[in-house]
Amino acid sequence: MAVVAIVDSGLNLNHSDIVPKLWTNAAEILGNGLDDDANGVVDDVYGFDVLSSAGLSTSLLNNGDPQGHGTHVAGIVTRLSPKSKIMPLRILDVNGNGRLSDALFAWSYALDNGAKVINNSFGDVGLPPSEFSFMEEAVRLGREKYGAVFVAAAGNQSNNNDVLPGTPANVPGMISVGAVTLAGAVAPFSNFGKETVHLFAPGERIVSSDAFTVSGVTAKSGTSQAAPMVSAVVANLAGKNKNIPAATLEQKLFKKLKPSRQLVDVSLTGSALASGLTRKVKSLPPTASSKRYAREDFVIGQLRRDRFIGVLDPSTGVTQKDVANDLLCKGNSLIDEPDWPFDNIAVFSVNQSSRRSRGGCRGSGRSSRVFDKPKKSNPPKQAFTQIVETGFFQTVEWDAEVSFASDRSMSFFDPPSLLSSEMSLF
């Protein structure tokens, strides 16, 4: 049995497809308002809602996924890898939008709680992964320390990711997945890339769980749907050996692929998942097969200037405590004490006005690191500069907005007049 983390918009915890496959945290007691296992998250019996800094939960109006995207993605895994357990990690809001820094917290939680596969059906287009080396470092740690495999949707802009990259799809160490039609051709909406997209999987009219019912299904199209198929296959391979290294799992995955002439010039492997591995999610009822899907607009990714991420420079020997002490020493600091999703990766939030320290400065040999008073203009840039000038960090990079990889959806239970296409950023 392998645990598959679904980093997405949440999960319908009451859906009949999900309930028997749901990962649970046995060290936590549901509903007592306490952090029983002292992992920093209260009531995280059924996963982690990064947006609320608490366990994923349900209400009368919300089964755990107010957007619907994450449940559909998770349902694909439950169908193709029935022995796996689903760990929901919510980083996207009701509109399908989120942040790369929140993905770091989700990945950290997943790794600490035993996830072997981490599915990422979200992303950003137009901002090169080289600007987000903190993600590369997190993936490296996840692969080497935990043996986890990271899978990402390539995106839905009909874009060549070799030229205009996607994040996290293009992050080194990430398996990037494009989408093919039911006939095996590259889906018209799918991103591609001979150097950056590893493989393809079906992504047209994929049947999976509907987040807004307790037993219904919905059809969606997109690379969001292709990625979890790959995650499911990896989970099946991992279930036989929980200690298998990530690189070995990936080698076994690539042996499951079927070469295709249509994919040779648009992917690294020139292949797609064999049809026998995906059959359970490709059949459609007659009433839905005639529907058409809209194309989405092309969108360029956006940096966020109120939060940034630093990767510690190992050559300095600096610790988390050193960083905290340095910040507390500054009466004019524009930065709160950072969060640490990984031991060597810090997430900083920017205050809009300087604050005075209440103490905590070690007072020894640190005077050379105290900065001049920040300028009143552009606090985020000044705060960013403060961190860079410490010399503690190998890289310091701005956060960025991400969104689920755009899909088109239709419910089998809605009358035709109510059917509509969902569109979003990638």
Image: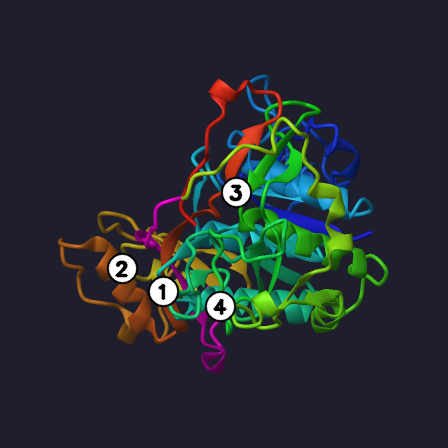
Q: CA distance from mark 1 to mark 4?
A: 26 Å
Residue denoted by label 1? 397
Mark 1 or mark 4, earlier in chain: 4
Q: CA distance from mark 1 to mark 2?
A: 12 Å
- Closer to the chain start, of discs 1 and 2, is 2
Q: Is residue 281 magenta?
A: no
Q: Report helix, strand or loop for mark 1.
A: strand
Q: Nearer the viewer, mark 2 or mark 4?
A: 4
Nearer the observer, disc 2 or disc 3?
A: 3
Q: Is disc 1 surrounded by few (<14), some (14 to 19) or many (20+) residues within 10 Å?
A: many
The residue identified by callout 3 is 50
Q: Which mark is residue 193?
A: 4
Q: Amino acid at mark 4?
A: Gly
Mark 2 touches mark 4? (CB < 8 Å): no
Residue that label 2 marks: 383
The quadrant where residue 284 appears: top right
Mark 4, secondary structure of its residue: loop
Out of 155 and 43, give the one closest to the viewer. 155
Q: Label 3 neighbourhood size at 10 Å, few (<14), some (14-19), many (20+)? A: many
Measuring 47% from the left and 74% from the top, which residue is drawn there? Answer: 318
Identify residue type, mark 2.
Answer: Ala
Mark 2 vs 3, N-terminal side = 3
Numbered disc 2: secondary structure: helix
Magenta residue span? 296-322
Task: Indicate whether 375 appears above or below 312.
Answer: above
